[in-house]
Amino acid sequence: MGTASPRCPPARSTPPPPPLEQGPRPPRPPAPPPLALLERRGGSPRPRHHSPDTLVTNPGISLEEILFSVIGHSDFDASPDLILTEDINGVNAGLFFIRRSKWSERFLDTWWNHTSFVQFGSTKSGDNAALKHIVDHLSPEETQAHVRIAKMQCLFNSYPWVAMWKSVHRLIFHPSTTWKGAYSDGDFMVHFAGLNDKRGWTSRILREITHR
């Protein structure tokens, strides 16, 4: 097993969860990356979506350990349907877990059909804005029953720290939120969200891992 980050230590290994069943989807504009990936993942065990601009940095940490750290038990039949992280802007669609259930199918259908958020000709897919809108408008009862947000973003969605004005501003005015999401050695995965030189950042992190 790999050495976990001291901020985000997974609790323990657990049995694999049941698979997610996906029904057919109605036609829509070209799908942004998260939904497109889930569409191709119909029969896999509990899908974990991750954006293409991510890198697993500690493969010694199992997905079951991460799930246990979030929900506090290994009974996946009784677990929430959707597990997310959030950053300073709210929930993030870059990485998430989703459980096999009718609720999940309805949720994905709703997300899929929020086509007004798809931004053609933009570098932003609009998918994250759609997810945030849907989650923000769930009732407290539905949120409690079906959604969990990890207390520590770095558990499975760490961001590299970049010394620029926006990052310093966030650190000064939102220190706790910024710290919870900043990548450090031992974290499970790093997400190069909003960074331009993703190839360069990937090479840099891989070099750091190699020389641990």
Image (tube, rainbow, N blue to C red):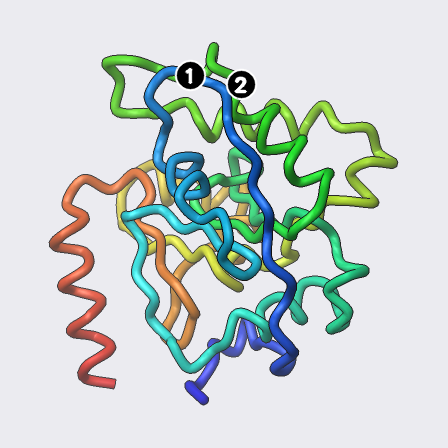
Q: Is residue 64 left or right of residue 193?
A: right
Element type at marker 2?
Answer: loop
Q: Which residue is mark 2?
A: 113
Residue shown at the point (45%, 89%) measured from the top left: 1
Residue extending furthest toward the top: 116
User: Any mark on residue 28, and which?
Assistant: 1
Q: Nearer the viewer, residue 114 or 12?
A: 114
User: Any mark on residue 49, and which?
Assistant: none
User: Is residue 179 visible from the viewing direction of this image?
Assistant: no
Residue 37 pos. (x, y %): 39, 42
- Mark 1 surroundings within 10 Å by alpha-carbon count, few (fewer than 14), some (14 through 19), many (20 or more): few
Residue extending furthest toward the bottom: 1
* 1 shown above or below 31: below
Q: Is residue 183 left or right of residue 132?
A: left
Amino acid type at image mark 1? Arg
Q: Nearer the viewer, residue 99 or 129?
A: 99
Q: Is residue 81 left or right of residue 152?
A: right
Residue shown at the point (14%, 45%) measured from the top left: 197
Residue shown at the point (58%, 33%) measured from the top left: 108
Residue contact at pointers 1 and 2, CB within 8 angstroms? yes
Residue 113 pos. (x, y %): 53, 18
